[in-house]
Image (cartoon, rainbow, N blue to C red):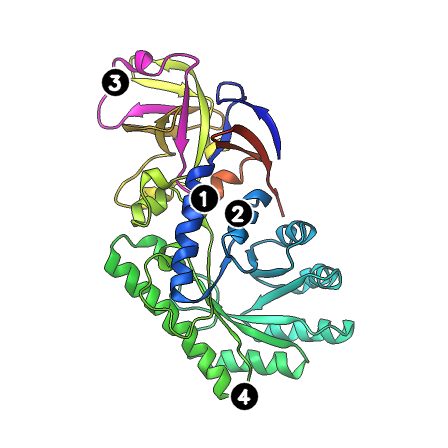
Amino acid sequence: MTDFASDLTEIDTPAAIVDVQRMRRNIERMQQRMDAFGVHFRPHVKTSKCTPVVRAQLAAGGRGITVSTLKEAAKFHAEGIDDILYAVGIVPSKLPQVLALRRRGCDLKILTDSVASASAIADFGRAQSEAFEVWLEVDTDGHRSGIQPESPTLLEVARTLSAGGMRLGGVMAHAGSSYDLDTPSALMAMAEQERAGCVLAAERLRADGFPCPVVSVGSTPTALSTECLDRVTEVRAGVYVFFDLVMHNVGVCSMDDIALSVLTTVIGHQLDKGWAIVDAGWMAMSRDRGTQKQARDFGYGQVCSVDGTVQPGYALGEANQEHGIVYREGERDGDIAARFPLGSRLRILPNHACATGAQFLEYHALDDGGLVRWDRAHGW
């Protein structure tokens, strides 16, 4: 973390800006909610991939972290964080990396959802005299990976791991389809579906004689919408730390909660079209158009003034690689050059904070004391 600028006029654009006050407020909101339920909270750090952000999440009360790449696991273990869940199904080619991290003292848990994967873990573990801690991924909503809670495969995988000398650490679910919802009742129903399915999987394992100490659920929408976490031991969520326009459309945050934006400079105009051209294209914002299938489409992002004030009706409606097009939705703005003069700076709120953050090697953290640079992990 290095002091390097006093305001947003002194840095090159495009740049990723983190509003630290908003970020802290988001962290406190989530942690206080989990504390009230009496469950552990394991933040998913794939959103920020940034040590100061993760430190703030843990300082607030988070226990352990969730990662989506082994590069993240290695980075944060080197920073002194040992309790790490790698929440992506493991493949045999990555087991040597997992072994190396564990032998350096990292309490790294891995994930499986098939007999084939469980067999590979057991074979490699036996060959290396290593008892890996393995969690079973449970599919509660048909969104992505996982074993359905009532499937015979659940017990087959547990037996394969146990027979191979591996440790069954628990079950986890991720209700990713919650991103497609936008009403409190639908979100609460999905949260309960996620909870009940994961609990059922744990109960089936225990009834068959297997230990299942951890029952882990989570997505930002379900974590912020659930009314019951009975028999759940921990919750995971990631994008809540920054929020974004998709989460705004889902209904779990306001515009004033979104802590990540892209600082951009107006580099030209097309007056006959009512366009302002900026230097943030899809290479800065990412190609993620997650709001396109929601009730409100924000194009490539919501336009704000340099101080973060939302400019209603103005969006980054189109983007090329290094060019973005700002215009007023629904009608041509004949005064756009006066509204957004050449050389002026704007901030764009992103559709998907994880995807936009991934376009940058660093964040520029904006706080009362000015700006500091925060490095982030990049790549795989």
Viewer-closest of 276 and 239: 239
The mark that comes first in sequence, 1 or 3, is 1
Q: Which mark is residue 24?
A: 1
The mark that comes first in sequence, 1 or 4, is 1
Question: How far is the residue under mark 2 from the one under mark 1?
Answer: 8 Å
**Mark 2 in CB contact with mark 1 (< 8 angstroms):** yes
Q: Is residue 184 left or right of residue 360?
A: left
Question: How far is the residue under mark 1 from the one under mark 3?
Answer: 37 Å
Question: How far is the residue under mark 3 from the one under mark 4?
Answer: 68 Å
The mark that comes first in sequence, 2 or 3, is 2
Viewer-closest of 205 and 233: 233
Q: Is residue 222 left or right of residue 183?
A: right
The residue tagged 3 is 333
Q: Is residue 202 above or below residue 373?
A: below
The residue tagged 4 is 209
Quadrant containing the N terminus is: top right
Quarter of the image for residue 103 reads bottom right
Q: Is residue 74 above or below residue 316?
A: below
Range of magenta residues? 325-352
Check disc 4 and give the amino acid type: Gly
The residue tagged 2 is 56
